[in-house]
Amino acid sequence: MTLRLKKHRAHGPHGADDAADATADTNARSGAQPPPHPTQRIPLPHNSMFVMGPATNTKWLHGIPHDKRPAAAKSPAETFQGGERINQMRIWGQGARGKTADAAGLVTHGEKESTDLLIAFGAENQMTEFDWDEYYGAGFDVVSFTTKEDK
């Protein structure tokens, strides 16, 4: 996952000011490059999840850049499932209900499935003898959480 500070945040909380605009115009005319936006890179190993709250989302652009490295340079976790990455429409794999691309289901956004997944996360964090199959075994097709508190 790569996070980049949004353009208007790089110049202050209220956007770019006149001086910054003038500097940008001067840079454009002279061919000088503006300073890069602050960037953070966060490794996401297989089966990991990155959660951003609304405040973070307002300040940072986020994305998973295409990995152009040859397969030989990638770790086994990076080549798992043929190197497939997130699909926002259809979901399959170890944590989903459908385990193969042929059995992929549509991504859901339901309150019940979101709540069930959050309950499973909580149980896993609290229990020393956690039964993975009981909580996660059937899989989940949710990628965005919606709960009663969100409404």
Image (cartoon, rainbow, N blue to C red):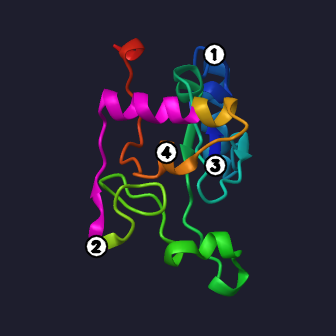
Q: Which mark is residue 102?
A: 2
Q: CA distance from mark 3 to mark 1?
A: 21 Å
Q: Residue at x 41, y 37 (%)?
A: 144
94 vs 37, left or right, is left
Q: Earlier in the sequence, mark 3 or mark 4?
A: 3
Q: Which mark is residue 2?
A: 3
Of badges 3 and 1, nearer the viewer stands 3
98 vs 120, left or right, is left
Q: Earlier in the sequence, mark 3 or mark 1?
A: 3
Magenta part of the chain: 102-121
Q: Residues within 10 Å of mark 2 (few under 14, many from 20)?
A: few
Whether residue 145 appears in this view of the structure is: no
Decide: is 105 above or below 7.
Answer: below
Residue labelled with disc 4: 134
Q: CA distance from mark 4 to mark 1?
A: 46 Å
Q: Earlier in the sequence, mark 1 or mark 2?
A: 1
Q: Earlier in the sequence, mark 2 or mark 4?
A: 2
Q: Earlier in the sequence, mark 2 or mark 3?
A: 3
Mark 2 element type: helix
Q: Amino acid at mark 2?
A: Asp
Q: Residues within 10 Å of mark 1 (few under 14, many from 20)?
A: few
Number of numbered labels in the structure image: 4
Residue 46 located within the stretch drawn in magenta: no
